[in-house]
Amino acid sequence: MTSFNEGGASYRSGEMIIYDTLVACGHSLLKTRLKFKSKIPYDKVISLLTKFITGNFLTYDEKSRNYTVTGKGRLFLQNHLIENRLLTTGGNRILLNWGREDPYSDPFLEPKLEYSADLLKKIVESAKDYATLKLFENPYRDKYRIIEQILEKATPYEKKTKIMDDCNLSHTQLQEYLFNLQKTNMITKTTNKSNKEVFSATPKGKFFMASHQLQGSLMKTGKENDPYMKPEILAQIEAALSPIAKIRITPKTTFITVFDKPIIATER
């Protein structure tokens, strides 16, 4: 079976398009350079940049003609990188830098993540009244959305057949997802009171759900009274994410630190 970070769909989800653009933009970047760095066709660049500005992911300086990532955009970047770490860590090792192995136990099982997940859920709930903008609407589910749906059904626990039906997955598809979710400590297999096999989301899995819900909420909030542009909300999200990872963007490189381990995420 393939792992979560192998292969993938031939299309990019809305989340991936935003991520690629923000990473390409880095500290600040001209539109012409942004086109090449973010791998976006030229005819889509203008409309996408308008959406990014409307969604408060980028600001535009008319004097320098540069696009710059906002605090909200940096949180989106940081959270996306955390999601990928959640999908590539598990068992008795951490997979850093997409492949380098370090002999440590899985840090994402730490109890403090449960508190972070609760905080993210409260922030997302409080932002629903502002969710008036839909940056990207995609009829297809990406792997992040499918994983979130499986984990939702497995909270507190659920049988395999029920998860398969409710998530609209084939038996083969579900088997592969469950295999990887167990491998990465996001879900556990146990038995209920009737001695039937069930699957239950772990604290790490619950944090992934909260993290992905935050990404969806960030993509749905716009210019008018955007809660994610308020300093107090930004500070709360930072507090929830800081025990796990921190991000620093320079004109040439995006650095991320996961559990005090420095990683160069992207070099531009």
Image (cartoon, helix red, strand yellow):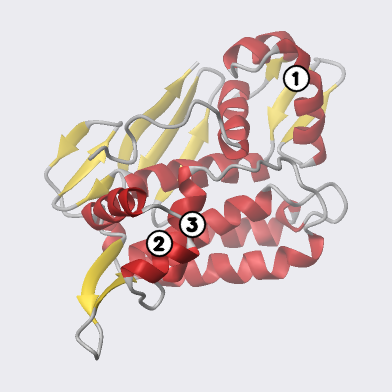
Q: Residue at x 76, y 47 (%)?
A: 134
The answer to whether any part of residue 240 appears in the image is: no
* Sequence-earlier tag: 3 or 1: 1
Measure how far apart labels 3 and 1 are at the Cα level: 32 Å
Quadrant holding the N terminus: top left
Q: Please, what secondary structure does the residue beneath circle 3 have? A: loop
* Sequence-earlier tag: 2 or 1: 1
From the image, tell me which residue sits under label 1.
Answer: 44
From the image, tell me which residue sits under label 2.
Answer: 164
**Quarter-wise, where is residue 47 in the image?**
top right
Left or right for 244, reference 27: left
**Viewer-proximal residue among 40 and 262:** 40
Left or right for 226, reference 158: right
From the image, tell me which residue sits under label 3.
Answer: 168
Q: Residue at x 54, y 39 (%)?
A: 77
Label 3 crowding class (10 Å Cα cut-off): few <14, some 14-19, many 20+?
A: few
Q: Amino acid at mark 3?
A: Asn
Q: Position of residue 155 (x, y in %)?
A: 41, 74
Label pair 2/1, CB-CB below 8 angstroms: no
**Viewer-proximal residue among 103 and 41:** 41
The answer to whether any part of residue 99 appears in the image is: yes
